[in-house]
Amino acid sequence: MSYQQPSTSVPTFPAATVLGYPRIGPRRELKRAVESFWAGRATVPELGAVARELRTGTRTRLAGLGLGEDASIPSDFTFYDQVLSVAAHVGAIPDRFADLRGPGGALDLPGLFTVARGEGDRAPLEMTKWFDSNYHYLVPEIGPETEFRLVETPSVKAFAEGLSDGVVTRPVIVGPVTFLLLSKPSASAPEGFSPLSRLDDLLAAYTDWLRAFAEAGATWVQLDEPALVSDAWAETPAQVSDAVGRAYRALSVDLARPERPALFVAAPYATIGERFADLAQTGVEAIGVDLVRGQAPAIDGAVRAALAGRTIVAGVVDGHNVWRTDLDAAAAKLDRLREAVGPEVNVAVSTSTSLIHVPHTTADEPDLEERLRSWLAFADEKVGEVLALAAGPGAAPEAFTRSREVAADRAAAPGVVVPSVRDRTAALTDADFHRGDYDTRVAAQDAVLDLPPLPTTTIGSFPQTSELRVARASLRKGEITIDAYEEAMRAEIARVISLQEDLGLDVLVHGEPERNDMVQYFAENLDGFAVTQNGWVQSYGSRCTRPSILWGDVSRPAPITVGWSTYAASRTDRPVKGMLTGPVTILAWSFVRDDQPLADTANQVALALRDEIADLETAGIPVVQVDEPALRELLPLRRADQQAYLDWSVASFRLATAGAADATQIHTHLCYSEFGEVIGAIDGLDADVTSIEAARSKMEILPDISGSGFARGIGPGVYDIHSPRVPSTAEITDLLTAALASVGERKLWVNPDCGLKTRGYPETVSSLEHLVAATRTVRERL
Ligand code: GLN
Ligand code: ZN
């Protein structure tokens, strides 16, 4: 069932574009404005004015960089999250927020923030990772009761705003199939309900939305459908394929031009595979594919014929990482694609994903070493790359020459390949990845630690007070000496140790006061990394992270944590747990070199951590926790790729920890609770104790874990640290009782869900008091 192009002429797709642009502002202006609004220091109009200025700034900047053609500048602004924004447009807001909706069903800005952040007993939408990135979206709740209707159109207003400033932007919205696949069934949905079953109703709202864009004068609209690159859904590929066909026939054929803008469907983050042919059989005018993480789609005669007169938007510039593009290699990909599709099909150049995953510009990094900076391309520099690729080597020879020079310089620069590091990884044998047998370890650890049943501990950090932040800032500005800074940190450690003794916790931590961030802290102390000054990227809502740049071979010039941990241990007779960030998490939350396999980079980091563990051991630290909260985050989106990932990621954790003596207890911490597909990998880590998030899901995960035969220590978090709410002793007692039933007293540990750094002291102390009291109650019943 092939679709014939209608005679109404389709506007030309711009030759070069980017799939999206950072929304938070070069100096995190949106974060500041939103947070002062939340704090009651700014009004809605004031916040609106900052947002307006940011949108104008983005359009002006992108036009200045050369994205001048109509529809080449994306319009993708949102105050909080692009998935929440779709939910708000189509009225898909859970019933518990019904009172926030205005007469027409729309949420105002304070209402939108309430849905995102919760209020009192009213839980916010759940938040989870956006594909394999460190961006988090809000999970819509969809049920049979959800009424889809276009109730508000800030996206259309933003387009009109651009137009009134003289720029024809290209609105970017999340597409209907991805929206529903990312949703979860609402509280009132029957067992087994699939949000995707509501597709047809949702399409009616999208139809109105596209009409509104057309009426406002939009020529192209971009619908992001990253869900198409994944096959890890509850729905079968056939069901997803059917949904794609249905959705895009409804939006492109049933809704004919010029009643709608031309449609560009983008499928970033991995290989589009067979969903490409599905889209080609609809009437969408352009299809975007990721040629950095993904492979080019298969183009046979039927697809070629179906595509005649349309555009493939080739994502050949990495939107997810910060290295300058090898323009020759990217141009070769474009040539191959042009050859495969033939002259009838237009090929445009783009980034592989939205640029929300990278900082604004390398020009804003005065402290970055010049040579390293010359290898990098942040958002603005990537715009230059797509333009150069669209022009081609003939028209933009300097850009291509520069790209070659950069590649040669990077390959030859000192530190990129360090022979001693390479020799060490080359000499690894299987034995380096294995510890002694678990029963022997347990006996050796019991002899050293002498812990009660259901030992209590925390995940590592204690509240980061403003005094700690001020001390760090003063050190940076040279206002205090390093000695004074370290003295302040030791005072904090001493305080946190005596607090934990008073609370009656069993395994103590030093509290991580010296860490600005669990990855950056290690990056600052390892060779092969650089850190940025303004390289912020949005993590969720107003929260940003500043990933470090892993550019060279990694090694550890000196011990990193040993001084802090031994100082903590000197203040108490109880066991102190050393605290490290694992290799996979260090990779996941950094921008990682793209010139060697991730597995090799992970092993280099692992060896540095292995040396740190050896030094902690020598210093008498009996327990070491190696955090891997990001283990699941890098899980490939296509099932076929997952095992290879789990093999190298688990191996790198084992390499980091397998040098530990039997008597040293290795803990790990994973901060999520969807374990289904990774339970085998968690077991494979071979940690003596694993703490996980479990409070929000009321310990639902436990039967899965014990059913899987997981045989080592486990600490299912007993309270949610993401909220200031203090859990009662009774509530924790109930959770522990449930946990005990499936885990058993020999294996159960008691701890919060995650680190306490974002919490305040009052709620932390009360919560931990209740945690210890509940543990005592349950122990007495044993
Ligand atoms: N040890 C870290 C902390 O407590 C773990 C944080 C995390 O899991 N994200 O802060
Ligand atoms: Zn955590």
Image (cartoon, rainbow, N blue to C red):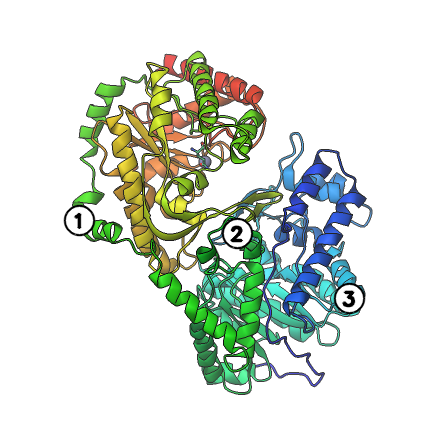
Q: Residue furthest right?
A: 103
**Mark pair 1, 2: CA separation:** 36 Å
Residue 52, x across and y down, in percent: 75, 53
Residue 199, x across and y down, in percent: 61, 60
Marked residue nearer the N-terminal end (3 or 1): 3
Amino acid of disc 1: Thr
Residue 643, x across and y down, in percent: 32, 55
Determine whether the residue tagged by mark 2 lies in a helix, strand or loop.
loop
**Mark pair 2, 3: CA separation:** 30 Å
Q: Quadrant of ligand 2?
A: top left
Q: Which residue is mark 2?
A: 130
Amino acid of disc 2: Trp
Marked residue nearer the N-terminal end (2 or 3): 2
Q: Which residue is mark 1?
A: 429
Q: Which residue is mark 3?
A: 163
Residue 407, x across and y down, in percent: 40, 66
Marked residue nearer the N-terminal end (1 or 2): 2
Q: Is residue 687 visible?
A: no
Q: In which quadrant is the C terminus drawn?
A: top left
Label 2: how many Cα within 10 Å (few below 14, some 14–19, many 20+): some
